[in-house]
Image (spheres, helix red, strand yellow):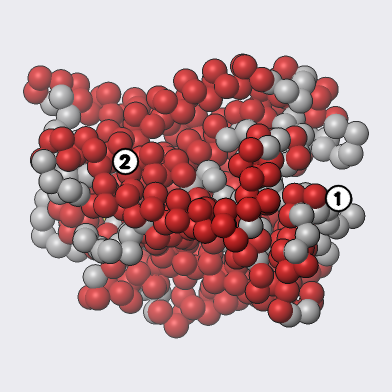
Amino acid sequence: MSVSALPPTRARRWPLATAAAVCLLSFTAFWVAQRLAHVNMLDVMVYRAEAETLRAGDDLYAMRATSANLAMTYPPFAAVVFLPLTLVSVPLMRTLTTAGNLLLVVALVQLSLQLVRPGLARPAARAELWRRTLLIAAVVVWCEPVWTTLRYGQINLLIAVAVLWDLTRREGSRWAGLGIGLATAVKLTPGLFVVLLLAAGVLLWRRDRRVNQWLRTALTATGVFLGTTLTMAVALPADSRKFWTGTLFETGRVGHAEETANQSISGVLARLMHTDAPGLWWAATAALLGGAAMVLAVRAALRGDKAVAVTVTAFTALMISPISWSHHWVWCVPLLILLYDRCTRAWTVTGAVALAFASFALWWVPHDPGRPELDQNAGQMLLSAVYPLTALAVFAGYALMRRRARRSLPGGHAAADPTVDARRDGSRTGASQADVSQAGVVAPRSPVDGRQAVAKE
């Protein structure tokens, strides 16, 4: 099963009203399924407790909430963001959180489509964009990261939408960077997108000697993050000092590294080494993998392939973070859309990756209290590493395709063309231009399934 965008000729067979009905039916079934599963929405209860602690003027990082005795792990600004949760009753808060997250699923799909195919954001393609958005959202809501995000009432969808909102703004937008800056002030991992923006922006500036959108967005995001953080340092000096000088480095308060829900490299190594502290092995692996992956991302950005650059950066952040719970991997949504759009064997590749994120395979291993993950066998380790292994496979496949693309060109160098997205998008949305691969190669191939086949990466 693929959760990708439908080919243009097929998508038009679905009236917008039908697509909306399909999405509403799927979301209703999802809501009922979660109620029947008696989801506890544990994390939103912790968020509420953090906001109540802030209102009471107590120590944010001494707080413990719920029967699981959970602590606050985000910067102080997060507690400010959660203040609206204290304005309604707990039952209403749970309902609004679920409804809000379902709307964010729709927003994430739509922004992902705009990232992959910018032409869909044009007014003339607006109906087509909404058709695809609603049909895809009806399917991806059932994948494990999205299911688990709603199960716990997590903020992962909000973070992803804030980042993608920035990265799909029109050229010259003065607001681009606001979302990434605020997201980083709430949860630090989106800060890796600032690294991407700065690196690509500086390299493009050195080449063109003019300020570009990447650099402007990076500077805005950095300014928003620093401004927000400094404001919190003034408003909440004790909590800010405690977080930035101590709590930030206490990864153990988030959870045990070896838990199967931890789908980062740290979790994989912890289970492989039968320890809860992979230490220097994790640091070295994360540095090596993160550096190599960010090289791929920056090179894609310099070629004008923003979709690849953003997706690789998102998955790199998930891989190198000390703790990346399975629900953090909602970035699988833009990945699946990108794979279907780019891969020559779209249904096969996208279906295989979709299966990894929809199978709930990581929960097939013992994960009850008692820390059984410290004694996993080889088969259980593979199941517990399904998301990192999938990401590694995608990275390796992309790097191999880029290498083949370079070898296929005279002199062995891929063309660097920052306008390739615009030219390619026109052909994929019905214009008469030639299809162009991200390596800048015209692909004279026959139409397949109502869309032009292209030389894919």
User: Which type of secondary structure does the marked residue at label 1 adopt?
Assistant: loop
User: Which type of secondary structure does the marked residue at label 2 adopt?
Assistant: helix
On the image, the x and y values in percent for residue 192 come to 44, 41
Q: Residue at x 74, y 30 (%)?
A: 258
On the image, the x and y values in percent for residue 387 come to 59, 37
Structural distance between the alpha carbons of marks 1 and 2: 39 Å
In the image, farthest residue toward the bottom: 17
Rendered-image quadrant of the C terminus: top left
Q: Label 1, on which residue?
A: 69
Q: Nearer the viewer, residue 435 or 250?
A: 250
Question: What's the amino acid at mark 2?
Answer: Leu
Q: Residues within 10 Å of mark 2 (few under 14, many from 20)?
A: many
Where residue 299 sits, quadrant-wise, is: top left
Q: Residue at x 77, y 19 (%)?
A: 274
On the image, the x and y values in percent for residue 5 come to 40, 59
Give the number of marks. Answer: 2
Q: Residues within 10 Å of mark 1 (few under 14, many from 20)?
A: few
Give above or below for 385 relative to 346: above
Visible residue check, residue 3: no
Q: Nearer the viewer, residue 10 or 37?
A: 37
Give above or below for 253 relative to 433: above
Q: Label 2, on which residue?
A: 198
Determine contact: label 1, label 2, CB under 8 Å: no
Give above or below for 333 relative to 311: below
Give above or below for 381 relative to 6: above
Q: Earlier in the sequence, mark 1 or mark 2?
A: 1
Is 364 positioned to the left or the right of 223 in the image?
A: right
Where residue 124 sits, quadrant-wise, is: bottom left
On the image, the x and y values in percent for residue 308 come to 34, 42
Visible residue check, residue 87: yes
Question: What's the amino acid at mark 1?
Answer: Asn
